Image (cartoon, rainbow, N blue to C red):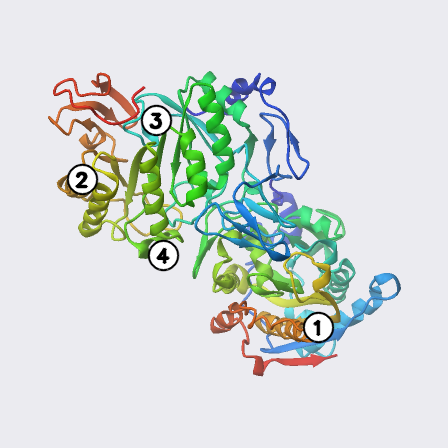
Amino acid sequence: MTLNRRRFAALLAGSAAVGVAGRGLAGVSLRPGDVVDGGELPAREASWYRKLEENRVECRLCPQACKVADAERGTCGVRENRRGTYVTLVHSLACSVHADPIEKKPFSHVMPGELALSYAAAGCNVECKFCQNWEISQFRPEQVRATYLPPEALVSLAKRAGARLTAATYSEPVVFWEYVRDAAEAARNAGLAPTVVTNGYIQKEPLEEVLPLLRAVKVDLKSFREEFYERQVRGRLRPVLDALEVIRASGVWLEIVVLLIPTLNDSEAEVRDLSRWVKGTLGSEVPVHFTRFHPTYRLTDLPPTPVATLERAWNVARAEGLDFVYLGNVPGHPGESTRCPGCGAVLVKRLGFTVLDNRLVDGACPDCHRTIPGVWA
Amino acid sequence: MSSRLTRRELAALLGGAALSGAASPVSSRFPVRHPGLVAVARLAPGEGCGIDPTAAREAVASALAAATGAAEAGAAVRALFRPTDVVGVKLNCLGGRRMSPRPEVVNALVEVLAAGGIDPGRIILFERSSRELEGAGFAISRSGEGPLCFGTDNDYEPRPSVSGEIGSCYARLVTETCTALVGFGVVKDHDLAGVSGSLKNWYGVIHNPNKYHDNQCDPYVADVVRHPHVADKLRLTVLDGVTAQCHGGPAYRPDGVFDLHRLAVSTDPVAADLWAWRVLDTERVRRGLPTLEAAGRPPRFIATAAGYGLGIGDPAALEEVEV
C-alpha cells in the first residue's frame, strides 16, 4: 500500500502529539510531518566515529572507514564533519514511506502476508551500478524531498496503517543506522517487529549494537566474488560475509538475496561456491533468494536475467544442500513458494507479493510436522 | 526545491534560440588554448583588507590578455566567447567568506567580460547551492541587469552520465543553460585530493561528489571534467590567490592561510592546477611542512587529466607569465 500525500498527511495527523520537535546541532526545529526539501538539515552527532588530529574524523560505521576532513562528508554523503564533530544528517528524515507486504522485502519466513511499514532515508555507502533505487540511494539528503518522521511518529504511522512490522529498506539502512536503532527500539516497545533490509556493509560494533533490537535482517549478497564487489559495487565482499556470520550468530532471523546479473555474477561455479559457503558457515536453514535483474541506473546494456538462469541457480543451491531456495521478480513462478524440505509439500503459496495460502501450523509442516524455521508470529 | 530556470527565464537568457532550435548552443572544445600557460597578476588587498575594484579589474584584464596571447582583454574575451554565449562562472564557495573567490575579484571578471562584449545578463555566477554563495558574500539574483547569481540547488539531469569511472547527474545549468564555462576557484590544500583549485572545483556540478573521494579523487576529478558537458564548454580558468591555504583544506583554517597576493588565469585547466600545486608546496616547504607528495596526497588527478588531453600536466612544461 503506497501512502499517497493525502493519506500520509491523514495518518500523521495526531502524530505531532507523540513526536517532539527535534533540534539538531544545526538548530533546525522540526515537527513530525514537516517536509524537508533542500533547506537546512537537522544534524545529530553520529554514534560511531572517532576524532582524529586537526579536526578530522574517522567513521566507524561501515567498512569504508572514511577519514573525513572538516566540512567534508563521507562516501555515504549523509555524514558530515563539522569542525571535528561527525554528524548524521538523516536521522528521522524519511524520504520514502510505504506499507508493503513483507514478501516485497523479500522475507519468506517472516510473518507471511503481514504489512511492514517500510521507510528509508537518502544515501548509501556503496554505489552499485545496478541500483534499483538510485534516485534516493545515490543522492545526498538535501537533494531528496523528505518528511521528518521521528521514531514515535513512525510507529504511530505503522499502527494506523495496520502494519505489524517495520522495515528499514529501499536505500541503505546502514547510513541511517542511528535512526534504524531508535526506530527499532520504539517499534519493539510498541509490540511491532522491526526488520532491516541491508547490503550488510557494516562494521561489527554498530551491527552488534542494533541486532538485539531486530526481529529479522535481509542481506543483499551481491556476488561471491571480490572482483565483482570492487568493480560493480565499490565495496568489498569480505566484510559482508563477516556481517552475515555476526547476524547468524546473534539468533536474529536472516535471509539472503542474490540478484543474478547476466554474465557478471550468474555462473554456475559462483552460485555453487556461494551456496556451499552459506551451508557450511551459516547453515542450510538460511533462506537464499535468487532474484531477477532488470536494466537500470548505470547498467543498462545488459538484458533481464533469463528465467532459465534463475532456475539453474535454484537447482545448484538445492543440490548443494540449502533447504530454502526462492526465486524473485518472476511472479507466478513456483520458486516463490515455501516448500517443506522434509516432504516437499507447499507450505506458503505465493503469487508475487501476495500470499495465496499459508498451511503452516505453529511454524511446522501440517503433513510431516517438520519445524520450519522463521518468525511466524 | 529546484532552482531550475523557468522557460521564460531560459528564453530570456538564450534569446529563444535554443528553445526554438534555431541555433545550437554548443560550442567546440577549447576554441583558444595555450597549453601550459598560466598568467599571474599581482593583486593585494588595500587598507581594511578590501580589494580595490580598479586594481582587481586591471589584474583580471592583464592576466586574461596574457593567458590568451591577445593584445588586450577585449580581444581575449572576443576570442574566447561569442556575444550569444550564456557564460556560467563556477565559483568554489565551500570555504565560506574567508576562503572563496572574493566578490570584488569575481565582479572584476564580469566587468572585463562585459567590456569585451558579453551582456552581463548572460553571465551566471553559480555554485552548487545558493546558501553557499550567500555564505561567501554573493547576493542571489535570478533576474535583472546581471550578472545572475544562484545555486544549481539540486537541479540535475534526470539520468546519470558515465565518464570513465564516474556515473553522475550533471547540473542542468551546465548541460542545458550555459554555452560557455569559466572555472573560478581558489588556491587551497585539500585533505584528500591534495589540491583544490581548478579541476576539483567541477565536483560541484555533479550530484554525487561524495562517492569519488577515494584514491585521492583520481581519476574521478579528471573524469568529471573530461565529460563533454564540461570539457566542450570550458574556456577559461581563474584562481583567486589573493589569499591561499597551504594546509588543512578544504575547509577554511586560519593557521593554513597565507598571503599569496596573486590572481592566476589560464585557458589550460590542468596547468592552472599545476601552478596551484607548486605555490602550495612552496609555502609548505617554507613552513617546514612536508610537500603534498611527501604528505601522501599528491594531486594525481592532474596527470590523469593531462593524459586525457585536458591540458599540460608536466611541471617542466608549465609556463608561468607574470603580468
Q: Do the residues at pointers 2 and 1 share their chain?
A: no
Disc 2 residue type (three-letter): Trp
Between the C-alphas of marks 4 and 1, the distance is 43 Å
Looking at the picture, does residue A258 appear above or below residue A233? above
Give me the disc on residue B64. 1
> Chain ID for label 2?
A
Give residue A231's mark: 4
Say if residue A78 shows up in the picture.
yes
Residue nearest the viewer, comparing A299 with B313: B313
Three-letter amino acid code of the residue under disc 4:
Arg
Mark 2 and mark 4 lie on one chain; the one further toward the N terminus is: 4
Quarter assignment of residue A314: top left
Front one among B13 and A149: A149
Which of the chains bears the disc numbered 1? B
Pinpoint the chain carrying mark 4.
A
Q: In this view, does A334 lie to the left or right of A112?
A: left
Q: SS class of the residue under badge 3?
A: helix
Q: What residue type is labelled 3?
A: Ile
Kindly indicate the quadrant of the structure image that contains residue B105: bottom right
Across and down, in percent, residue B123 comes to 69, 57
- Whether labels 3 and 2 belong to a single chain: the reply is yes
Q: Residue at x 51, y 60 (%)?
A: B224
Q: Which mark is residue A102?
A: 3
Q: Neighbour class for label 3 at 10 Å: few (<14), some, many (≥20)? A: many
